[in-house]
Image: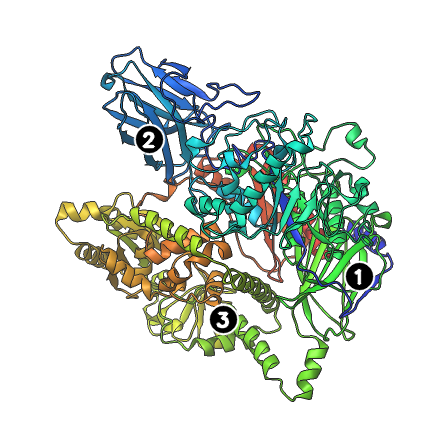
Amino acid sequence: MAVMKQAALFGLLAATAASAIHISIDSKGGNVTGGFHYGLLHEDIDNSGDGGLYAELIRNRAFQSSKGYESSLDGWYPVNGENLSLSTSGVPLSQALSTSMNVATGSTQGQVGFFNDGYWGMDVKVQTYHGSFWVRGDYSGYFTASLQSNITGERFGLARVKSQSRAHEWVEHEFTLTPTKNAPNSNNTFAITFDAGAMKSASLDFNLISLFPPTFKGRKNGMRIDIVEALEEFHPSLFRLPGGNMLEGSSNASWWNWKDSIGPLKDRPAFAGVWGYQQTNGLGLLEYLEFAEDLGMDLVLAVYAGLSLNGDVTPKDQLQQFIDNAMDEIEFIRGPPDSKWGAVRAKLGHPEPWKLEYVEIGNEDWLAGAPSDPDIQVISSGSVYDGYDIPSPGAGDYHLYAEPDRWISEFGLFDNVETPHLIGEMASTFPNGGTGWGSGVLRPFPWWGGAVGEAVALISYERNADRIIGALYAPILRNMNRWQWSITMLQFAADPAMTTRSTSWYAWELLAAHPITETLPASADINPLYYVAGKNEKTQAHVFKAAVYNSTNGASVPVSLTFDGMAVGTTAELTVLTGPEDPYEVNNPFTGVNIVKTAKTTVKSDNNGTFSFSLPNLSIALAFGVQPTRELRNMTEEHDSTTELESAESGQHQTLKYHLLGPSLTKAGQDSVDQSKVSEIIYNASKGSKFFNREEAKDKVLTQKIEQILTKKRRLEKLDLTRESRAADQLIAELEASRDLTQRIVHIDCDAFYAAVEQLDRPELRDVPFAVGGGVLTTCNYVARKFGCRSGMAGFVAKKLCPELLLIRPNFEKYATKAHEVRDILANYDPRFESASIDEAYLNITEYCTHHNMSADEAVQQMRDEIHAKTKITVSAGIAANAKLAKICSNFNKPNGQYSLPNDREAIMTFMHDLSTRKVNGIGRVLERELQEIGIRTCGEIHPHRQLLRQLFGEKIYQFLLECYLGLGRTQVQPAEEYERKSVGTESTFRDISDAAELREKLRWTARELEKDMQKAECKGRTLVLKVKLHTYEVFTRQVVLPRAMYQADDLYQYSLPILTKLQTESEYP
């Protein structure tokens, strides 16, 4: 083993012996820009619109037709053998939707109808779906809309809809549907059935049958949440619409006319898609504009120029119609609400104009043009490299789908080009050394080497951000069930678990996260290190972006980076992305394994103000720092005013001190403790330890993250957030409608449980401060809590707080026995109580109270008395309308008390209004601090900030916080084993181990423990995850997809050992 280690070390040293690259960055003299745009192009290719970004679940919902596409019943199937046919007889639903589905029944009784299998399935979760359908025919009964498994037929949820249909008139029916359980997979269908016996017509006609899950920001006719969130997370700031070939259409008689894509869905005709399938036009211009608004993206509007894919060229004397159409479109987007098309926009719900700065003429049509409006930058659909001149001040559009080496060869392509350009479409699509477009075969997915090549290109463009508007990845989305183009940034299917961020996504996300508004001159040459440096005027951060591509012998590249004027000891966050040894590996949606490794470290400038670090071959790096420069410090010294710097340093220490207080700050028994004194003791006691260093680094990262949140908040506050407020109010109304005040839920919490059980055996400990645990405390008695001791605290720190603290080794067998005694009593009040942990439980006592004619307060008091009498320990309880509130209430009158919150909305809202956010289960130290920084300290303060929350924190936290504001929570209580298990795991803490044999034995023991847990859970696993916490308190998590489902310890050990071995190598030889 020692020989192997030595060989590995020598190999590493040999690989890192390359000469260092010294880069000196000047403090001025660069290019001031508006901030380079990273963005995306979207067109409906690969079913990325219908069946993808557009959240509609029903395929072929309106039986549309268009040039080259006939109406059909594709996606529709009869229930109970009824006859389905297309009908064009009678009055159509609208001029746009002239064909409907006729359902003729031969039965005189029973349920009949039809179902739709969606876009290769439907994701069914316990959430509210909004649906509608139009019916014509004489029927007096009820319609049943339902979601069910296409495999077993199990029904997950239904809605009964009273028929309003009439014999000769189309009537719309709307409904909401909330499944009662999650479907195990996405192979599900949507059905509408009705009672044949209540039909007075021989048949019924149906059209525009629609079903939407919750959408991004709750928009009607909106976007799929998981896909938009993945797009939003890569920080796009520029959006080109409506895409490439889709704009042109197959001919000049079937181009994408934006006017067909606005207004009510029943008035939108289909679009003859150019990628082998028809489009519904449900995802229209208005939806695109709202999408851009929601993600904070600027617009590049492409307008039709009279050229189409089949070679149609519109004569000059016939172009005016398209010019007029383009001007109408521009007016629709940015015109005042009293203009002709601005008024149409206002009528559709958006009176405020959108900002529009860029308009492109056609798509890859190589048309040049100059602007007639000084506020608009006209972009020609071609580049100066396409062999023609672009009249000033027009801009060009450069498209490139290439092999990685091409990006390298073109690194300086725009260094001396004066004409501004948009990089309107780009992606690595072909391998180096291949035949490129000659083969017509793209790689199956974006690969790591291709992502590094893209990063080099993006760096080259950002170096020239004074003349490059931005770069757009295209195409952006691919449905894994049908595609025409394999290379996309994201892949997806009906099941959100398939939504996959490609290797390119990680490259673009890193570089887009910190835009440069002023590039700075640098001294060093490029190759194999390609870089750009500058600063951001908004965040005052210095930024360095780099990629290493094909270094000599694949060696790592040592870098020394000096910013002119940078102070000694300045810290910066360095993020490095690396891939596997094989650069052609991919993030495969079918395995779910992310091959991109992200390493974040803090680097500090030396006595010369220089940062030093090493970057591996085929890596992408970003460093940014916001510490003061030498110039600033000199100025403060000259003015004898160091208050600001001292305040910043003090503020940083204060946040760290609060962070060190730990996750158990809100534990009962801490109310009278001077937490500032406790934090000072913890700070001084742990300073210099590995734990302290790790926590300090985490606090700095959080501080930087908060600065980004505040920067985004300041930007948002400059915008009109009326729509955000309305969307939040709509969601609040929907959440309010789900409030259930019919149940009485109880949360039981045993008081200082481990300590209480120990005290039964040793009554002399009653007035002695003691804790159970050693290196880390698992619990403390209430005497010790008065000194600030609490669970999760390091033993040596607790001793500093309370030198007399007695530490007792835990006896888990004894605690489990006592817990069983308590649970026997709980079962008398709710046989289906839910164990939350060994010393906590939830009960629904509604039925018990009704049966025994008792109030909830009386029943809980009786329960607590019974537990104390039989077990000799005390419990505290919270009583409320739901589990979340009950959990909060149980902490109010500890120890040995209970608190009851009435099942009354006004009482609940009052209770939550002044409640500290930290007291809500699910809000920890990190989210608490983030909320405090934007002005939210209590749950009542959530509402005034509601218009900011989704943009700052994402959809899930946004909804969670609104639920907290309303005091909503679950009322379902059931045995823990009945919940769907997504994972089974075992974890243990032990002393520092570095011996390889001892580590392997610990891994084997862990595998055996996991086998026991999996046998108990009666399950097998396909993804194995290994989590390792180092003595430095760093945590590493790695996973591997197993070749088959397994549970036996030998198999688990066999597949986890290589992960451990690799982690050892990574941690020993960084």
What residue is shown at x 64% (from left), y 38% (from top)?
Answer: 475
Q: In the image, what residue type sits under mark 2?
A: Glu
Residue occupied by mark 2: 172
Q: Earlier in the sequence, mark 2 or mark 3?
A: 2
The relative height of residue 815 versus residue 323 in the rendered view (above or below) is below
Could you tell me if the residues under marks 2 and 3 are in contact, i.e. CB atoms within 8 Å? no
Say which quadrant the C terminus sits in. bottom right
Measured as percent of width and height from the top left, residue 131 is found at 37, 34
Measured as percent of width and height from the top left, residue 625 is found at 67, 67
CA–CA distance in space, label 1 to label 3: 36 Å
Q: Which is more toward the observer, 950 or 770?
A: 950
SS at circle 3: helix
Q: Earlier in the sequence, mark 2 or mark 1?
A: 2
Residue at far front of view: 317
Q: Which is more toward the observer, 197 or 490?
A: 197
Measured as percent of width and height from the top left, residue 678 is found at 46, 76
Label disc, if present, on residue 559 of the rendered structure: 1
Position of 624 compared to 778: left or right? Answer: right
Crowding near pointer 2: few (<14 within 10 Å), some, many (20+)? Answer: some
Residue occupied by mark 3: 658
| Residue 983 visible somewhere in the drawing | no
Position of 716 compared to 905: left or right? Answer: right
Q: In the image, what residue type sits under mark 1?
A: Val
Using the rendered view, name the quadrant where residue 584 is placed.
Answer: top right
Q: In the image, what residue type sits under mark 3?
A: Tyr
CA–CA distance in space, label 2 to label 3: 57 Å
Measured as percent of width and height from the top left, residue 733 is found at 33, 50
Q: Nearer the viewer, mark 1 or mark 3?
A: 1
